[in-house]
Image (spheres, grey):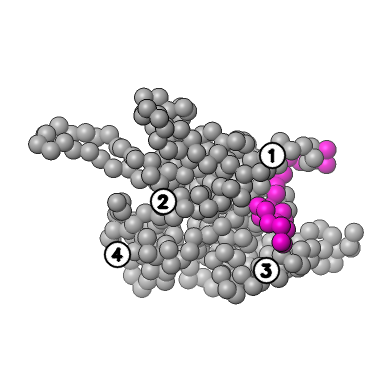
Amino acid sequence: MLVRCPLDSQRLTARISWLKREVIVGFGTTNIDGILSSYSEYLHHGHPENAKRFDQNRASDREAAVAEAVVFGMLQGFNVDPQINDEIKKGGADFICCASRGSLRRRLPQDRFVVEATSLSPDAVTNRSGIRNEVPDDIRGGAIGLVTRNICYKAKDKATQLGDYPMPRILAIASSHAGIPALFNSATATWALVSDPHWRQENGSSAVDSAEYTDLEKSVFIKPGPNGTIIACRKSISAILLVAVYGNKSEVWGILHPEAARPLSIAFLPDLPFVRIAPWPVVDGRILTEWVVASPSGHSVYHFPVRLPKANRRGAPSS
């Protein structure tokens, strides 16, 4: 069943304005093309094979290139020292990061985590949501389809790839679809964790059941277990980030796995809002969720050009 919700036209209108900016804006930020170009330059300085593949993706699958470049730039902004981890012909998670400081602590595995960047196909988002991937002349109210199933498919697709790292693993799902401001939000993050909600009403009964129910069909991290229990799945993914990309910034929401093989410490990314199940394990079939910040809204990350390695910055001596 396709669950639909009201289109937040005011929110989408506010965000659409960023999509219309095609030039570099003030305060050192840049638009999406600026991020793509600066990330390409970064790769060419130290990872020529990755650069070749990225430039090909930029031409043939722009959305995948946007996800890779934006997520890398975002991680630089979080000061977690992202490094290229994916090796051509060998594969692997895209980036490896370190959340600590100092040369000694950098060598400790518990301070590191990997990040895989992926994207939602614009056509798939359009088909699921009913929102065209173009900037409209005006915004009107209406109904949209949720993209929780698309998020769940991405988690299924990437779970095996992230399974062998002795450290936390993050899956970052990015989209620059024109309608993404209305599709990635705190509600979507919650519903991706517990699946789309529905309500029940007994035939012929006047009693109102105000409880929300879920069949867990589209949950990224939990599923029905034996004897009415609820159990964890896809434990290879420690957390998911939803990254809504537009103009010169992105907004980010996090989803924590309740029982990951390698749990992610939220102290690694302290500014991000994460939704989680609490308490865990679930008691009496009642799934309760909470945010690690009050009244969560997306964490805004402005796009700055990707910084080159210090030894390769123009005017700096090579090591």
Residue 165 shown left or right of residue 297 in the figure: right
**Where residue 248 sits in the image (x, y, percent)?**
56, 63
Confirm or deny contact between disc 3 and disc 2 (CB under 8 A). no
- Give the mark nearest the N terminus, 4 or 3: 3
Give the vertical position of 186 relative to 247 (above or below).
above
Q: Nearer the viewer, residue 262 or 37?
A: 262
SS of the residue under disc 4: loop
- Alpha carbon of mark 3 to alpha carbon of mark 1: how far? 27 Å
Q: Which residues are magenta?
A: 84-104
Q: Are marks 3 and 1 in contact (CB under 8 Å)?
A: no
Residue to which mark 4 is pinned? 140
Q: CA distance from mark 4 to mark 3?
A: 40 Å
Q: Residues within 10 Å of mark 2 (few under 14, many from 20)?
A: many
The answer to whether residue 38 is visible is: no
Say which residue label 3 marks. 53
Q: What's the residue type where badge 3 is placed?
A: Arg
Of the two numbered discs 1 and 4 in the rendering, the one whose residue sits closer to the viewer: 1
